[in-house]
């Protein structure tokens, strides 16, 4: 299994441009998440999905959109990039939130480093 | 406000030495507590997960403890190696109507030197 994969690894955007960060997992996990990590800060949840066709906002959703058309893929869309969106973005997945420790485990991708100038 | 605070912010130790990292949380209602290791430029990788009823969990040279009464956890690293150099993140989970909600600490940056 490749686990959680993310593309691209790095990207530089100009203010106002748009882009999509790709995330895919091959573990047949129901839950998928997008986080951002700013220097010296803990990871913050942007959006999450509990299954195909279902998405919900996290702590910091403004300026982002997501979709979940398949179990495997969970792309994150930035429509009008702003300098405040400069960050490292992590996608993660987990089996679900049923009772049992295996369900709690979140597996993270390698991250996408985004700079908006 | 639900918070997770870690100390120290950074730590330098010599290879072969032990160290202990601390995590205090105010998250409620508590579901479970996790420790993650994050290498530079990589995503976090889980080390341990503990539920309310567990007070210790080991994973090789890593041993996590949890005191749910005082809302404190620690991660003890034994016989450190150069490859232990990383950020160690404490994460507390609460159960909400929408599922698990994770609150991340800011991490302790550990450097192991020769």
Image: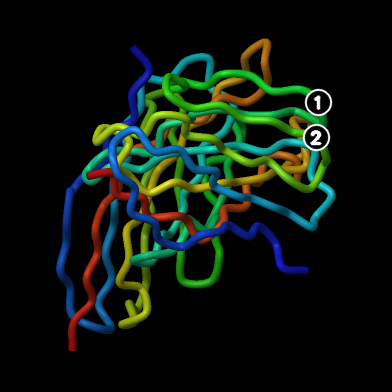
Q: Secondary structure at mark 2?
A: loop
Residue A77 image point, x, y percent: 54, 35
What residue lies at 44% left-to-right and 46% top-to-bottom?
A89
Q: How is the image coloured?
A: rainbow
Q: Quadrant of the N terminus of chain B?
A: top left
- For the residue pair B78 and A1, the one nearer the viewer reads as A1
Q: Earlier in the sequence, mark 1 or mark 2?
A: 1
Compare residues B22 and A71 and report the one nearer the observer.
A71
Q: Between A69 and B56, which is closer to the camera in this rendering?
A: A69
Labelled pair 1, 2 in contact (Cβ < 8 Å): yes
Residue at x 39%, y 56% (from the top left corner):
A11
Q: What residue does disc 2 label?
A: A69
Residue, disc 1: A53
Q: Are marks 1 and 2 on the same chain?
A: yes
User: How far apart are labels 1 and 2 at the CA level?
Assistant: 6 Å
Would you place residue A59 above or below residue B106 in this image?
above
At horizontal 34% and vertical 30% (from top left) the residue drawn is B4
Tell me which chain the residue with mark 2 is part of: A
Say few, some or many: other residues with alpha carbon within 10 Å of mark 2 (under 14 / 14 to 19 / 20 or more).
Answer: few
How many residues crowd mark 1 within 10 Å: few (<14), some (14–19), many (20+)? Answer: few
The quarter of the displayed image where residue A48 is located: top right
Residue B19 horizontal/vertical position (percent): 26, 64
Chain letter behind tag 1:
A
């Amino acid at each position: 299994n490749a686990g959680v994969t993310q593309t691209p690894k790095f990207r530089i955007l100009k203010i106002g441009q748009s882009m999509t960060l790709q995330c895919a997992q091959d573990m047949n996990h129901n839950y998928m998440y997008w986080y951002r990590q700013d220097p010296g800060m803990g990871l913050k949840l942007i959006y999450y999905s509990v299954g195909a066709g279902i998405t919900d906002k996290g702590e910091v959703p403004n300026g982002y959109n997501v979709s979940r058309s398949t179990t495997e893929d969970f792309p994150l869309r930035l429509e009008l990039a702003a300098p405040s969106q400069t960050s490292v973005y992590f996608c993660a997945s987990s089996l679900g939130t049923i009772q049992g420790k295996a369900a709690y485990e979140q597996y993270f991708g390698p991250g996408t480093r985004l700079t908006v100038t | 406000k639900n918070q997770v605070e870690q100390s120290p912010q950074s730590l330098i130790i010599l290879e072969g030495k032990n160290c202990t990292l601390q995590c205090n949380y105010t998250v409620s209602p508590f579901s479970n507590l996790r420790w993650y290791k994050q290498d530079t430029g990589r995503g976090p990788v889980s080390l341990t997960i503990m539920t309310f009823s567990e007070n210790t969990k080991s994973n090789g040279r890593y041993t996590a403890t949890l005191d749910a009464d005082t809302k404190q956890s620690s991660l003890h690293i034994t016989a450190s190696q150069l490859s232990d150099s990383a950020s160690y993140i404490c994460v507390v989970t609460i159960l909400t109507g929408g599922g698990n909600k994770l609150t991340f600490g800011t991490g302790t940056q550990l450097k192991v030197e020769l």
